[in-house]
Image (cartoon, rainbow, N blue to C red):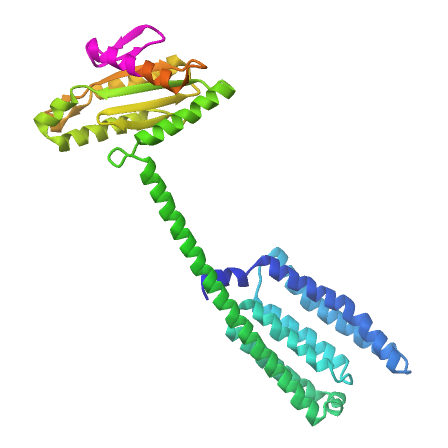
Amino acid sequence: MNHLLLELANTRQTYRKMLNLYWLTLVLTIPLEFFIHRSHSAADGSELLGTLIIQALGLTAVTGSTEMLYRYRKFQSDDLMIIAGIIYASSIIYVNPTIGIVPAIYIFPILTSVLSFNKNRILLAFSLVIICFTGLFAVSPELRITMQPMHLVGILFLYVGVTIIAFNISNSGIELLNNLRSATEAKQELLVKTVIMDKLAKMDALTDLYNHKTFHEYLEKLIEQNERNHLSLQLAIMDIDNFKKINDTYGHWVGDVMLQRVANIIKETVTPNDFAVRYGGEEFAVIFTEKTIEQSLRIVEQIRQRLAVTLHPELDSQAVTLSIGLQDYVKGDGKEALFKGADASLYSAKRTGKNKTVVQTLRSDHKGA
């Protein structure tokens, strides 16, 4: 049985409903039997009442035990539910042997077994029904009188027919659930592929940072948030100093390694509320949210200083430095003004010695040692 079938067969809600059905059957069966017998017999009802009380106590014990196991031990068993149904049906047939249609009640344990979606349990239910009916037929003279040969043939055909129907329902359920599983797996696979494709469209493959296109989309949304909700916002643009010389001297593969290391330092330093991007070539950008300009400045300085003291074996144990331009967003300026301000600060950092952060709004430089 596959996982879906097992989960369905062991569903607690279904088991609870079956238990409720047994309790309802118990409540309705005893008074109904009493009134049926009283209406068809003029004899004193004391003996009948005693039989019904014993039946009620027996069925209560069976259902109560199943209820206790389910409620306090969290135990649920399809076999136990089928056996309880057999006991219910057998007791009703035993107390009402003269009512010809009563043996048909044995179809309910067979139908109950369908809920397990297990052919062996359906076969078990059918076998128990045949055994119990044969036993009742042997010990009850009234039942033998009531069940003429044609009745016996009819009731056996009924049991066999219901069992065949149960098998077909089980097969249909298994096929349906298998199709559902296949459809679910296909949907999950498509969802995974969609997520991967979406990530590939948004991420830079080399550095695993967001790419240029995603940067502009995200920046526009954050500026809209700033305009509506006064969300604090800063933009830092970072450029690796002398990157062309690194490529020319050590090769492009070393340049790629440097890009990855710079990206890793950026990812490790920024907070979850920040948005780090490889803007293009050797340029990176970080959008800072929910921070003051001073807090954003401390973060970009940590990035710059960490990189400045990191020695790279691929560069003959030399360091790589960054020039950074940082710009605070002023409400109403728009994306273009924010970007131009950060870019102008970066140009100023490059022009005045590199390996420094320039913040245009503070009119001050933060220069590395």
List x then y, in percent, for residue 311: 16, 23
Q: Is residue 167 visible?
A: yes
Residue shown at 61% from the left, 78% from the top: 162
Q: Is residue 80 left or right of residue 221?
A: right
Q: Is residue 138 visible?
A: no
List x then y, in percent, for residue 306: 25, 20
Name the one closer to the observer, 347 or 293: 347
Up the image or down, 230 lies above or below 18; here it is: above
Residue shown at 50% from the left, 65% from the top: 176
Which range is magenta?
343-369
Q: Is 16 one of the magenta-colored residues?
A: no
List x then y, in percent, for residue 148: 72, 93
Asked which quadrant contains residue 353, the reply is: top left
Up the image or down, 291 lies above or below 95; here it is: above
Image quadrant containing the C terminus: top left
List x then y, in percent, for residue 204: 28, 34
